[in-house]
Image (spheres, helix red, strand yellow):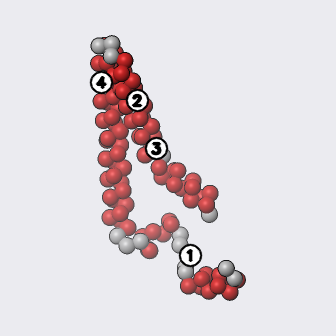
Amino acid sequence: MSSWSARVLAQVVPPMDPSRGRQWIPNYEQIIAALNGLTLAGMLFAAGVVVIGGATWALATNRAHPQGVTWGRFMVIGGFVGAVVMGAASAIVNAGFRLGS
């Protein structure tokens, strides 16, 4: 791209600051509310997976069922990992944005 076209694009396209989303994203509050609801649903699902996985693990251990123990263990670990990733999502996105800018 030539320097002339870069100057023209710089004049046509204003710089966007993600922290000012209310100004340039339509329905910003509704989108944020929907994302917060999805995060809550994901956290509740992860908590449910941990509880069900723990119950599966305990019952399978009591019944000497090795495959059930493995399923329960993977469910507990997966629920914890999912909760950590969802909880840290905003920090991950912000760190990635800072690295890219």
Dot placed on the residue nearer the N-terminal end, 3 or 1: 1
Q: Position of residue 64 (x, y in %)?
A: 33, 13
Residue drawn at (31%, 47%) of the image: 41
In the rendered structure, which amino acid carries the disc numbered 1? Pro
The residue indicated by pointer 1 is 15
User: Up-down: is 75 above or below 92?
Assistant: above
Whole-Å distance between the Cαs marked 1 and 4? 52 Å
Find numbered disc 3 in the image and state the secondary structure of the residue it sits on: helix
Dot placed on the residue nearer the N-terminal end, 3 or 4: 4
User: Up-down: is 81 above or below 4?
Assistant: above
Few, some or many C-alpha atoms within 10 Å of disc 1 (few <14, some 14-19, many ≥20)? few
Examine the image and state in which quarter residue 83 appears. top left
Position of the C terminus, as image quadrant, is bottom right
Considering every residue shown, the one lying at the far front of the view is 67
Whole-Å distance between the Cαs marked 2 and 1? 45 Å
* Front position in the image: 1 or 81: 1
The residue indicated by pointer 2 is 74
Find numbered disc 1 in the image and state the secondary structure of the residue it sits on: loop
In the rendered structure, which amino acid carries the disc numbered 4? Ala
Residue 12 lies left or right of residue 6; in this view the side is: left
- Check residue 55 in the rendering and tell me which mark sits there, or answer none: 4
Q: Nearer the viewer, mark 1 or mark 4?
A: 4
The residue indicated by pointer 3 is 85
Tell me if label 2 and label 3 are in contact, CB under 8 Å. Answer: no
Few, some or many C-alpha atoms within 10 Å of disc 2 (few <14, some 14-19, many ≥20)? some
Tell me if label 4 and label 2 are in contact, CB under 8 Å. Answer: no
Find numbered disc 2 in the image and state the secondary structure of the residue it sits on: helix
